[in-house]
Image: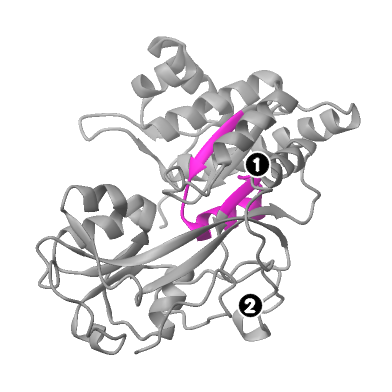
Amino acid sequence: MQAKPPSRERAVLGQLSDMDLRLLQVFKSVAECGGLSAAELELNIGTSTVSRHMKDLETRLGLTLCRRGRAGFALTPEGQRVYDETLRLLSAVDAFRSSIDDIHRRMGGRLEVAVFDKTASNPAAHIGEAIALFSEKAPDVSLQMHVAAIPAIERGLMDGSFHIGIIPAHRTSQSLVYANLFGETMLLYCGARHPLFGQNHAALTWDSLHAWQFAGLGYHSPNMELSHSTRLPRKATGFDQESIATLILSGRYLGFLPDHYAEAFERQGLMQAVHPAQFSYRCQFVSVLRRSPQPTRAAQAFAQCLLDAHAEATPTEVPQPPPAHARDGDGDEPLDVTEQDQHRTSAEQGRPNISNS
């Protein structure tokens, strides 16, 4: 005789109301902050009110969304599914409101901007100036700034979580629109405890670098393209520039970092560029918008502010679509590339200096 599945309280959720959306927004904050007390500051309401809202939502849905106890806060499997659907629903509601604003020729709501990490210290990046321009043009728009990895930004643009992104150019997608902004120089570094620190690097070549352990990014990027094209043996993997810097500082690995970011470590005597005239490459940063559905007026306005703020930058070639073998089946979405990915495109961000002379 089969055991009966555990019974659930009957859900009372019918048509969605403004109150339901409010409850879902509270749930989203609780999930992202990691608990009711942490969400109190984010929501600017008391913990008891947050708890009541969560209980009301669980009653409306007939589900237990989270568990709280000595082990800490955690979403239940049902809660995780509801959280994922909440993100989609709230994103759709924001898109609807933005469309209505577009009809009325006004800009309001929220604009989700995602940026690859360690751009703030780049003197060629004028993102702050673009934000200032945008704030004057659209004072009623609430900016939400995110720092994320390249594939996370691409996926966020495709699913609507982000409205505009700023990333290093690598392969391109037919579903995204790109515009050049600024450049960045990447140099090879070793930490103070590395055998190459303080040594003469003049005799080093790309081939001789194979004797040393290399730390690189674990997703498709200019960094991964370089490690593949030069066959550098990647022994450690990072997923942002901070993690690459930490691996270099260990003294066990060589790795590429933006020169403006590594400058502070160099001044402290913690890092050294390894033969910078030889081991370097250029990245070209681009703004990215989703092609369809058409970006909101706010997203387009922010993209224009980025172009205006970087208008004096040296123009470079806009990235072209990659060859067919570098895209997935229909060419509509960015590839979900792992460290085993072998696809490479001609580097719009600039070829590395790989001469052995």
Q: Residue at x 40, y 87 (%)?
A: 355
Read off the magenta span: 143-166
Residue 86, percent across and down?
59, 38
Residue linked to disc 1: 309
Residue 155, percent across and down?
58, 57
> Hey, which quadrant is residue 248 in on the image?
bottom left
Residue sitting nearer the eye, 95 or 187? 187
- The correct choice, above or below, for 100 with respect to 179 in the image is above
Residue 284, percent across and down?
56, 62
Q: Which mark is residue 338?
A: none
Badge 2 amino acid: Arg
Magenta-drawn stretch contains 144: yes
Q: In this rendering, does residue 90 appear at all?
A: yes
Residue 28, percent across and down?
51, 32
Q: Residue at x 28, y 73 (%)?
A: 275
Q: Residue at x 14, y 60 (%)?
A: 250
* Disc 1 packing (10 Å; few <14; some 14–19; many ≥20): many
Residue sitting nearer the eye, 134 or 122? 122
Tag 1 secondary structure:
helix
